[in-house]
Amino acid sequence: MAGLLTGLDWLSEAASTTELKLAVSIVAVALVIAVLFSYRRLHTWICERTRPLYADVVSMSVLIAACLVSLAVVTGVWGRTEEVQRLSTNLGLDSDDVARAIVSFLLLVVTVIATRFVSRVVEGIFNSSAAVTAHQRKVTHRLSQVLIWAVSLVVVLGIWIEDLGSLLVGAGFLGIVLGMAARQTLGTVLAGFVLMFARPFEIGDWIEVEGDEGVVTDISIVNTQVRSFDGEYIMIPNDVIASGTVTNRSKRGRLRLEVEVGVDYGTDVDRAAALAKAAIDEVDEAMTAPAPRVVGKSFGDSAVVLGVRFWIDTPSARRYWNARTAAISAIKETFEDEDIKIPYPQRELTGRPEAGGFRVTDERGAISGDESSDHRMTTTTPEEQ
């Protein structure tokens, strides 16, 4: 290593002035920056002409070579080889340590290439199966990365540490302690794996969990992201989903909507239901099969409440609100054209005969109407109140 560093001394002699040294350093750094910016383009260009694995090896080799050359040029130009040798001596680094460092670095590079290769293999296998979801692909990809990196780090540690077994035993006890301290997090991660295999919902489904409702936009090992119909993003921990009740409203790619409308008690309910169904049939977003339905919901304080139910396909927040708004507008217009009253809230007051009923008085305090009536109302002016 000392001989390699000594061979860089001629760069300092070649660049005798500070301006020239600064220019050479800028060129060396610019080389690394240029390689970084053109890395993806180079990788794509090689992939188009050969296998992706070869492209990974070549592009990574070019990047590493550019970084090493730039570091060597900057070190030699500024005459820092002696300081590097002194530092190496102070740290007690010998040729074996340098060899181990080089092997460790190469192992990490091979690990990066291996993770990319395995990712492409997994993607190719899953693409041929329609039963595998995007969430399962993502989780499998992450698991393969964790497994490869774990094996690589164990090998690297084995190069530097002779008694690796005791270290692994200590790491095992540390893992137990951390697991007990992070039970909630581990439970959430395990619930993420359960969701991956149980598949109660997919990305794009309309779900309701513990009062939170919306469209699933992302599923990770830790949590599930849901976009509500108000445009808000809700992060639900997977352990909450695994231990709670999940309602999937769009499991079959469709969603049922219900609009409640009240009609006056003097209205023919069957006729009002038929008109409401005919109004929904004219809504573009409503599906024809299953057909819309109108059911009686309840006897309200001021009206008979009808539930107008219909379905929409490929549910989303935008289609939900558009369909609901169109349904309300269509029902209101139809009822207005057919003189069907949608009553305001109202109250019917009756007086008890033994209490004298209600009394209605004018502004002068005189009693109007039949004083002997059992049902009279007494009103007062704001000044009298």
Image (cartoon, helix red, strand yellow):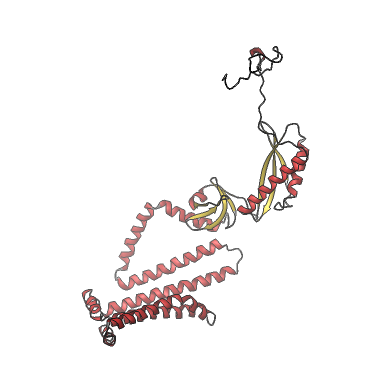
Q: Residue 361 sits in which quadrant? A: top right
Image x and y of residue 82, in percent = 23, 80
Give the answer, above or below, for where 111 lies relative to 282: below
Image x and y of residue 200, in percent = 57, 54
Can the viewer see residue 309 in this picture? Answer: no
User: Which residue is located at x 71 percent, y 36 percent?
Assistant: 342
Image x and y of residue 274, in percent = 77, 42
Q: Quadrant of the C terminus?
A: top right
Total numbered circles: 0
Q: Residue 13 sits in which quadrant? A: bottom left
Give the answer, above or below, for where 100 lies relative to 319: below
Q: Residue 98 sits in which quadrant? A: bottom left
Q: Nearer the viewer, residue 219 or 385?
A: 385
Q: Nearer the viewer, residue 277 or 240?
A: 277
Can the viewer see residue 345 in this picture? Answer: yes
Viewed as shown, does residue 367 lie left or right of 18? right
* Residue extending farthest front: 364
Image x and y of residue 312, in percent = 68, 52
User: Which residue is located at x 51 percent, y 48 percent?
Assistant: 243
